[in-house]
Amino acid sequence: MDQPPFDQDDFDDVRPQETGFDLAPALIGWGIAALAFASFIIINNTSPLVISASLPAKIFAVIVGAALGTGAALVGDALRRAVMPSAVYTQGGFFSLLWIKVFWKVGPQVIGC
């Protein structure tokens, strides 16, 4: 009996399947950005209410701000994926096109964050 020159296991795909939206890198990246932004806002806020707040209250504000900022950035990313145009037309030249491309890359996420 002739056996085929290949083994059936040679064709098994052991690579993970692409899902189209990998949450872990986006969650980590936007989480770090939201934490940095929340920390910056709390540190540089000079209103009497924030200045007189206790350290635990400020830490709580940073944690809540980072969590909400991360969630809003992920929602912005989902909206970006849903409504991003497949083609753009401009009369403004190169820099107008560059601005449009940069906006559709990170704009909704930054607005959410």
Image (cartoon, rainbow, N blue to C red):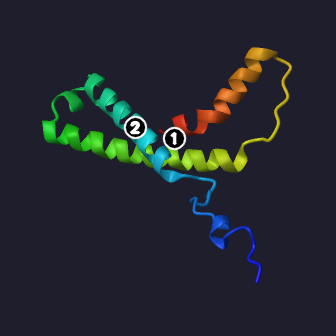
Amino acid type at image mark 2: Ala
Q: Quadrant of the N terminus?
A: bottom right
Left or right: where does residue 32 sit relative to residue 1?
left
Looking at the rendered image, the disc whose residue lies closer to the viewer, 2 or 1, is: 2
Task: Answer whether residue 54 is visible to the viewer in this image.
Answer: no
Q: Nearer the viewer, residue 35 or 4?
A: 4
* Residue at horizontal 38 percent and vertical 31 percent from the top: 37
Q: Quadrant of residue 5?
A: bottom right
Q: Which residue is mark 1?
A: 112
Q: Which residue is mark 2?
A: 34
Q: Quadrant of residue 69?
A: top left
Place of residue 49 in the rendered image (x, y in percent of width and height, measured from the top left): 22, 32
Q: Is residue 10 above or below residue 18?
A: below
SS class, disc 1? helix
Picture mark count: 2
Amino acid type at image mark 1: Gly
Left or right: where does residue 29 sit relative to residue 63?
right
Task: Please give the label number shown on residue 91.
Answer: none
Q: Nearer the viewer, residue 41 or 101?
A: 101
Q: Which class describes the residues within 10 Å of circle 2: few (<14), some (14-19), or many (20+)?
A: many
